[in-house]
């Protein structure tokens, strides 16, 4: 049996008639950039988050970068985040000229450890960037309190956790802005790339609307800007899919529960879901020593398991060894997690047979290891 890692082709076939109609409608309208389709999706996305503004941009990376620029982050500033994330989280900070300061993870959730944040704050610190890794929100209540105590901005990297919530709080409720990614494989993904900034702050939304369009709001250029617009075709696709997101999120949770029940006696470290939180399982990540042997076994069995993320950012070749970086960063928990993670296939279109096959293969590897 073959079990693929991505389900977006199946998803397209499930929604083909509605998606094709939405795409055709945009093509016939002749309005493809900053048109009514984008405006409609932005309203729907803001409503989904119960927030005032959503601004579509061309990627999750640009969502972060433009949010930072809108907050005035730049050279001379420090921004605190985690090294246990996709490279773009730090990259977007470096784009502004600011310095990234990495903080260790909580070993249970693999999100940033709020208990270690204050020790990293200096007079140069301008913002905190919690990443809601794998689909579970960081401890925003504690992070927000720290930010208020020190007068810091908070920008949430929500690229993997749209539709998630904490215990009594939602994305954006305790921050300046939420940044989303719509690349194909995300929980809400288009057929290509895209992103958005969602915020309750009019000043941030207005600034990003100008920044994404060469500094122009209404044909008048008030400042320098960039070309970073979510086009109406992608907005139409996302508008169709947004209606399905609550059902897809619940299906992801069902699959995660099946995995957890089937793997609880294997000895793998399984995802930890904080009580009261709604984890939406962009990824279902297990941890084990000898990760590469397990990954090879699963791949040989036809299961397209992958690794997110195999090397912590501060250990990667692209880490900017200069003024924008901490040359002495040591994060043993982050490094240990990166060396042991495996992502099992996780998407709403997985069949029951495929889920059972993945569980059986993981259990078979453990059994073979014990008898060896």
Image (cartoon, rainbow, N blue to C red):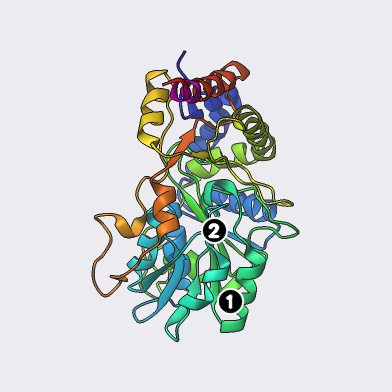
Q: Please, is residue 120 above or below residue 63 in the view?
A: below
Quarter of the figure with the C terminus: top left
Magenta stretch containing residue 175, yes or no? no
Name the mark nearer the viewer: 1 or 2: 2
Q: Please, is residue 264 above or below residue 170 in the view?
A: above
The image shows residue 108 at horizontal and vertical percentages of: 57, 52
The secondary element bearing badge 1 is classed as: helix
Residue marked by disc 2: 106
The image shows residue 332 at horizontal and vertical percentages of: 40, 58
Is residue 34 or residue 6 the one in the foreground?
Answer: 6
Q: Please, is residue 270 above or below residue 255 in the view?
A: below
Residue marked by disc 1: 147
Residues in magenta, as a range? 365-370
The secondary element bearing badge 2 is classed as: loop
Q: Quick check: can you spot residue 208? A: yes
- Name the chief secondary structure element in magenta: helix
Q: Residue at x 71, y 57 (%)?
A: 50
The image shows residue 97 at horizontal and vertical percentages of: 32, 73
Q: Residue at x 54, y 75 (%)?
A: 153
């Amino acid at each position: 049996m073959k079990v693929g890692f991505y389900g977006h082709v199946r998803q397209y076939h499930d929604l083909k008639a509605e998606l094709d109609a939405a795409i055709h409608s945009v093509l016939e309208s002749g309005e493809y950039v900053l048109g009514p389709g984008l405006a409609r999706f932005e309203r729907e996305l803001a409503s989904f988050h119960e927030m005032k503004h959503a601004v579509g941009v061309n990627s999750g990376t640009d969502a972060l970068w433009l949010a930072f620029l809108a907050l005035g982050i730049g050279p001379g500033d420090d921004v605190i985040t985690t090294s246990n994330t996709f490279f773009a989280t730090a990259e977007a900070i470096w784009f502004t000229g600011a310095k990234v300061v990495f903080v260790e993870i909580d070993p249970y959730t693999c999100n940033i450890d709020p208990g270690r944040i204050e020790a990293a704050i200096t007079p140069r610190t301008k913002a905190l960037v919690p990443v809601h890794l794998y689909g579970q929100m960081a401890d925003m209540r504690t992070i927000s309190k720290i930010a208020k105590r020190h007068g810091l901005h908070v920008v949430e990297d929500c690229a993997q956790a749209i539709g998630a919530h904490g215990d009594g709080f939602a994305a954006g409720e305790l921050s300046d802005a939420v940044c989303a990614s719509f690349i194909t494989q995300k929980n809400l993904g288009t057929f290509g790339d895209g992103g958005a900034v969602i915020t309750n702050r009019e000043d941030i939304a207005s600034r990003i609307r100008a920044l994404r369009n060469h500094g122009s709001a209404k044909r008048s250029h008030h400042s320098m800007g960039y070309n970073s617009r979510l086009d109406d075709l992608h907005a139409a696709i996302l508008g169709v899919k947004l209606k399905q997101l609550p059902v897809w999120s619940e299906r992801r949770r069902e699959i995660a529960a099946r995995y957890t029940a089937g793997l609880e006696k294997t000895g793998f470290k399984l995802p930890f879901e904080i009580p009261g939180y709604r984890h939406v399982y962009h990824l279902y990540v297990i941890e084990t020593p000898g990760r590469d042997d397990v990954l090879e076994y699963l791949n040989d069995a036809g299961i397209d398991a992958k690794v997110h993320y195999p090397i912590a950012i501060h250990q990667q070749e692209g880490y900017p060894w200069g003024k924008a970086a901490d040359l002495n960063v040591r994060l043993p928990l982050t490094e240990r997690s990166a060396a042991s993670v495996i992502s099992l296939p996780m998407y709403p279109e997985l069949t029951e047979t495929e889920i059972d096959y993945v569980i059986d293969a993981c259990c078979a590897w453990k059994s073979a290891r014990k008898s060896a």
